[in-house]
Image (cartoon, rainbow, N blue to C red):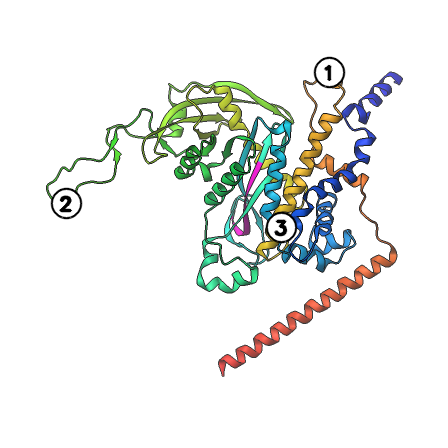
Amino acid sequence: MTQENNTLSSLLDPTRWGLPAQAVDELPDALYRFWKHYRSRFRTRTRDQAEHGHDYLSALLRMKDKRNFAEIGRTVKESGENIQHFMSNSPWLTQAVFRQVQADIAATPALQHGGALLLDESADTKAGPDSAGSARQHNGRLGKVDLCQVGVFATFAKEHLWTWVDCELFLPEAWFDSPQAARRHKAEIPDTLQFQTKVELAWQMVQRAQRNGLPFEFVACDDLYGRANWFRAAMHGADLLYMADVPRTTRVYLTRPLWGVPTKKKRKGRAPTRPRVLSPERSVAVWQVAQAPQTQWQTLRVRPTERGELVAPYAARRVWTLRDDQPTEEWLVMRQESDGDIQYAFSNAPADTSLERLAWMESQRYFVERSIQDAKSEIGWDEFQAIKFRAWEHQAALTVLASWFVAQTQLDWKQRFPTDPTLAAELGVDQLPELSVNNVRELLRAALPLPCLSRQEARDLVVTHLLNRTRSRKSRLEKSEQERRQQIKDSS
């Protein structure tokens, strides 16, 4: 029993896992140094509210729930009104934060090779229609149409490290209709904004990342973006490698079709002017390609996962699509999932790219889904409540910073405090798990604990809540009375 206890004690030794007390003790100072590096991005011409930003960032990382303006203000001993002003009204620029984060990633030696830029969208249910961009639209999280707000997100990922680097709020086309002018004004939607699809927003983020020198080797995205021929053509034209999912019904040619303008066959009528496929060969759906006898499948070990390894059957074929408004050769990459479903993706990787490389690229899109999950479950993205467009952008900027701080901490500790090289062998595994976002947050809470309320502070807090609820009721009653008088006036 003593031997077993000694063994267990050795396995539970934090220093063997790369977690010396020094690392945890340094976390509060590390967070403040991190913030000081970015504080200039939060100054405006008239005010320096950077400390509010540090308080807000710290609260996002330390609080477990209820991360709204009022609760964050209470946690950091600051007026909720000041926090709300900083987030909803202060004119600091979100893109300045994104540019700095991307520049810092580019300057990190360990991240300069092997990274990917991953795109995805995500929806958050809203209680009312006034929040910027809120509308009845598809909510992928619920799998149905719902009143929600949709953001488009860009994640930088390398191996088991990922961080948000850019975000855009999707504003449905109905928000730009004339009858919606009052709602746009209430949400303070900039007059310069025009309707853009999610794919167009994603392309803007890809272009920004390329200009900012973000060191990604390829772009990966789901089929919302992959089925847009113009989007893939734009990335290819910008010398960007991509791995873009497409629906199973997407049609391709297995040999290069003849392409051109048909000759005029009848005397009457106009001569054809638009090029099209002239050869008799018909296109086929990609699911048919997967079932064709010529398609050779190979089971590959693609990458490590939390539960072992991603092992799946893969196949790839050169096909012709109409990506550039003419026959264009692309890779069709296919992966069979454990339930038998097959995922399909197009790639402009060189013709001599190995199946192993294509499979690895295809597997990386998982990390954008993981980054969105972390942002919601760990950093409070899905707890955000505000009406104004600027507040959404500011929340995105601080979520990007929180995400990057965690990633930076994971990387720093891995380099400075490596795990005991004999630990994996003792446990009978090939590698040990990486620190998670939750792990870093737990350690930060221990090193920088949330304040406990005194009896007096608790009483003051309750009185403040009661006062605010009373003022809210008074405001609603006054508004109701104004509406009643207006109705009487309109009917007379």
Residue 269 disc label: 2
* Residue 79 sits above or below residue 16 on the image: below
Residue 301 disc label: none
The amino acid beneath tag 3 is: His
The amino acid beneath tag 2 is: Gly
Determine the residue located farthest toward the front in the rendered image: 45
In x, y percent, where is residue 322?
A: 34, 33
Residue marked by disc 1: 425
The amino acid beneath tag 1 is: Ala
* Magenta region includes residue 148: yes
Badge 3 marks a residue whose secondary structure is: helix
Q: How many discs mark residues in the rendered view?
A: 3
Q: Which residues are magenta?
A: 145-155
- Categorize mark 2 by other alpha carbons within 10 Å: few (<14), some (14-19), many (20+): few
For marks 1 and 2 on the same chain, the one whose residue lies earlier in the sequence? 2
Q: Nearer the viewer, mark 2 or mark 3?
A: 3
**What residue lies at 22% left-to-right and 40% top-to-bottom?**
273
For marks 1 and 3 on the same chain, the one whose residue lies earlier in the sequence? 3
Residue marked by disc 3: 394
Determine the residue located farthest toward the left in the rendered image: 267
Q: Is residue 226 visible?
A: yes
* Residue 146 sits above or below residue 29 on the image: below
